[in-house]
Image (cartoon, rainbow, N blue to C red):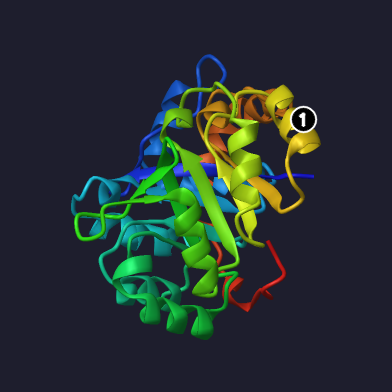
Amino acid sequence: MLLIIPSIDLSNAHAMRCVVGMPGTEALYSEISDHPVELAQLWRRENAKCIHVTDTDSLKGADSSANLAMAVELQKAIDVPVQFLTWQPTVDAYRKLLEAGVYRVGLSGTVYSDPEGIRALIRDFGPSRVIFGVRAHNGDVDCGPDVGMITDEEYIRTAFELGGRRTIYTEVDWEGKLTGEDLDVIARIASVAPMKITMAGGIASPQHLWMLQDSVPKNVDSVVIGRAMYENRFPCQNIWRNIEAKLEPAIHAHAHENSVQSSISKLSSDEV
């Protein structure tokens, strides 16, 4: 079965999406979006086994220091991996995140700017905690002004040669569109190197998931879902929203009490 990974997009340490709740609970979910720790805890209560977090400010070249600090706080607050995708100019920035406790970081342009630094990072923390983010457009990946455009296949081969064993892949045209993912693209990407693949973007319904489950190669083992999760497009979410509506007065009171210092760094490389 494909592992479903809910996502949180951060901008200036705030969540960019708001869960659509039952009538009368709008204020609850609006406030949760202002407190990403509570949002991560909500996904965890709903049985998430991993939380994907994207630093959107870094992808735009803006200051992302608040998002980096929030990623560390999120990992402290939940007992499953935080998978943090961020664009940082140096390998040392990713090392600091891992040392601070973030379970998994997604690398980007540093694949070409500091390959030896990446080899050392994977050697020190393992390929389960250091993965490679691919955000493609028509099969090309923008690796920054110093490198330019690289084909997604070349990028994945390079990541594998550096010791990478997992890629998280999205196509810009899939993001937030709820149009499904291109199965031909997935099959092509999955055949490039013997890496595990996490797909992201485009999922709108259980039907999309079933189609992926039946069609994708075996090394595609997980999918990141954003908008569809926030819009409750999966049947089980109606149950959760009804329960949360009844428990609304207690949710905020207990959110931080239920935070735990994560022991996630002790997970073996085979987990998640």
- Towards the viewer: 217 or 97: 217
Is 6 on the left-hand or right-hand side of 196? left
Is 144 on the left-hand or right-hand side of 250? left
Q: Can residue 37 be seen in this view?
A: no
Image quarter of residue 248: top right
Q: Name the residue: 68% across, 23% down.
A: 238
Read off the residue under disc 1: 210
Count the labels in the image. 1
Q: Can residue 247 be seen in this view?
A: yes
Which residue is most to the top? 23
Image quarter of residue 211: top right
x, y percentage for residue 95?
38, 76
Question: In the structure shown, which secondary structural element does the residue marked by tag 1 occupy?
Answer: helix
| Pointer 1 local density, CA inside 10 Å: few below 14, some 14–19, many at least 20 | few
Report the quarter where the C terminus lies: bottom right
Q: Name the residue: 31% across, 55% down.
A: 143
Is 172 on the left-hand or right-hand side of 230? left
Q: Name the residue: 46% across, 49% down.
A: 152
- Towards the viewer: 67 or 186: 186
Is 263 above or below relative to 230?
A: below
x, y percentage for residue 173?
43, 29
Is 35 above or below relative to 98?
A: above
x, y percentage for residue 4?
66, 43
Q: What residue type is labelled 1?
A: Trp
